[in-house]
Image (cartoon, rainbow, N blue to C red):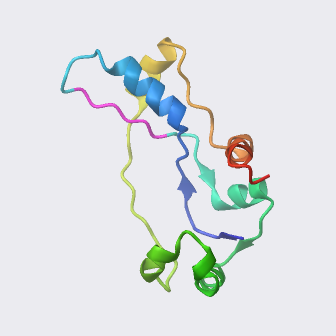
């Protein structure tokens, strides 16, 4: 099950970010580069890609709390709010980074069902 949260996630693959960092290392100091994947994915799409149910936050939280001993999230259980979490995220302008990397053939794949499925396969979860 996946919690139904009201925002989209930035899923930027580590190989894209690592390639980007290495490529831009030689540029002048003081420049900022942002590696936010502008093609975000919502929790409904994540659940679909995983073949999981999308459930309200409270139901997800209760299920996690009921299985704490067997879940890696156990140390973080105390910070799971009873209220649906709302995160404020900065808005990153990645256009310059994306342009410079695209010129070098480094392109971030969209955060979509295929990317989530690739992650699950790599983790031997499907």
Which quadrant of the figure has residue 64? bottom right
In this picture, residue 35 sits left or right of residue 46: left
In this picture, residue 4 sits left or right of residue 100: right
Which quadrant of the figure has residue 45? bottom right
Residue 25 place in picture, x, y as percent: 31, 20
As drawn, 17 above or below 78: above
In this picture, residue 30 sits left or right of residue 53: left
Q: Residue at x 49, y 83 (%)?
A: 83
Q: Farthest residue toward the left?
A: 30
Would you say residue 57 is visible in this rendering? no
Magenta stretch contains residue 96: no
Which quadrant of the figure has residue 115? top right
Q: Residue at x 63, y 76 (%)?
A: 70
Q: How many marks?
A: 0
As drawn, 103 above or below 36: above
Would you say residue 70 is visible in this rendering? yes
Q: Farthest residue toward the front?
A: 69
Please provide the residue range marked out in magenta: 31-36
Q: Return the residue nearer the eye: 64 or 98.
A: 64
Q: Residue at x 46, y 20 (%)?
A: 101
As drawn, 82 above or below 105: below
Residue 114 place in picture, x, y as percent: 74, 41
- The secondary structure that dominates the magenta segment is loop
Residue 119 place in picture, x, y as percent: 67, 45
Residue 125 place in picture, x, y as percent: 74, 54
Q: For the N terminus, which image quadrant?
A: bottom right
């Amino acid at each position: 099950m996946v919690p139904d949260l009201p925002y989209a996630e930035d899923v930027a693959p580590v190989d894209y970010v690592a390639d980007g960092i290495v490529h831009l290392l030689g540029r002048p100091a003081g420049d900022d580069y942002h590696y936010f994947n502008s093609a975000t994915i919502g929790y409904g799409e994540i659940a679909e890609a995983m073949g999981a149910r999308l459930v309200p936050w409270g139901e997800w939280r209760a299920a996690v709390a009921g299985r704490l001993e067997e879940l890696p999230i156990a140390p973080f259980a105390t910070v799971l709010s009873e209220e649906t979490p709302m995160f404020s995220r900065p808005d990153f302008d990645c256009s310059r980074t994306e342009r410079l990397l695209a010129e070098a053939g480094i392109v971030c794949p969209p955060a979509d069902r295929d990317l989530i499925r690739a992650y699950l396969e790599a983790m031997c979860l499907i």
